[in-house]
Image: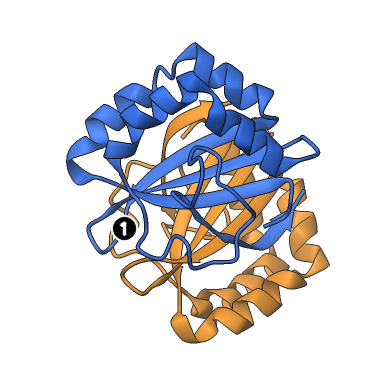
Chain colours: A orange, B blue
Amino acid sequence: MNPNRYAHVIQLQLDKVGEYKRLHAAVWPEVLAQIRQSNIRNYSIPLRKLPDGGLYLFSYFEYVGADYAADMATMAADAKTQEWWAVCKPCQKPLPDADADAGAGADAGAGAGEWWADMEEVFHAD
Amino acid sequence: MNPNRYAHVIQLQLDKVGEYKRLHAAVWPEVLAQIRQSNIRNYSIPLRKLPDGGLYLFSYFEYVGADYAADMATMAADAKTQEWWAVCKPCQKPLPDADADAGAGADAGAGAGEWWADMEEVFHAD
């Protein structure tokens, strides 16, 4: 991906769609503040059922800082963010090959290691 | 989706990945101009192989106009855009249920009817 745009994908557990939507309709203020402090902007998560019957979350955000890895590490070390991830992660199911791609570093929303899988940007127009 | 953000998904034919990347690394200037004239901004297409073995294109863009349906209709009527779609569409494979969702109107890049499938936004933070 372009260093300023990040796209990731993960599965949503089929029985957790209601819980995930409810959580994300009212993300904790401390978590939103940490996202912003980590220089992430314009962050969207669209959802779609795909032909294999799975539910997939795509995430798109822009990074406006100068050191992505450092900002992601600070976010991953934040206690409230860790608490939030502990609530959200049971709703998600990482792709079996989430680690397979040469990615853009640590994933936002993932902490250490690959949780969300990186995507490859094949087109962009401002 | 929010009326100002659109996310869609479609499959890429497995044997067309090279051609699709090549085409999208050098989109025709007239097509880019039409996209801009149609009030589409910040348009990205990330790609990922998913666990079913399929290649998926996820598109994200922002709409800055006042009449999305009219702008999409104008784009769909543009001769050069039609020519571009005729080149690109054989690379793609619409989701079997692309029409199933109550969507945001005609899809950009699709012309009349559903080609790209709409996604549902479950989270956004500016």
Q: Position of residue B24 (x, y in %)?
A: 39, 25
Say which residue appears at 77% left-offset and 72% top-offset.
A26
Can residue B93 be seen here? The reply is: yes
Q: Which residue is mark 1?
A: B50
Quarter-of-image position of residue A45: bottom right
Q: Which is nearer the eye, B74 or B28?
A: B74
- Which SS class for mark 1? loop
* Furthest residue toward bottom: A15
Q: Amino acid at mark 1?
A: Leu
Say which residue appears at 48% left-offset and 52% top-offset.
B114
Q: Which is nearer the eye, B113 or B36?
A: B113
Above or below, comparing residue A80 to residue B117 in the picture: below
* Furthest residue toward left: B15
Chain hosting mark 1: B
Q: Position of residue B109 (x, y in %)?
A: 50, 37
Q: Residues within 10 Å of mark 1 (few under 14, many from 20)?
A: many
Say which residue appears at 62% left-offset and 37% top-offset.
B72
Instruction: Please give the count of numbered marks on the rendered protein.
Output: 1
* Furthest residue toward top: B29
Quarter-of-image position of residue B71: top right
In what quadrant of the picture does the N terminus of chain B appear? bottom right
Can residue A3 be seen here? The reply is: no
Say which residue appears at 27% left-offset and 38% top-offset.
B90
Above or below, comparing residue A47 to residue B17 in the picture: below
Position of A50 compared to B125: left or right? Answer: left
Position of A30 compared to B102: left or right? Answer: right
Q: Which is nearer the eye, B114 or B119?
A: B114
Position of A56 compared to A69: left or right? Answer: left
Above or below, comparing residue B108 to residue B6 in the picture: above
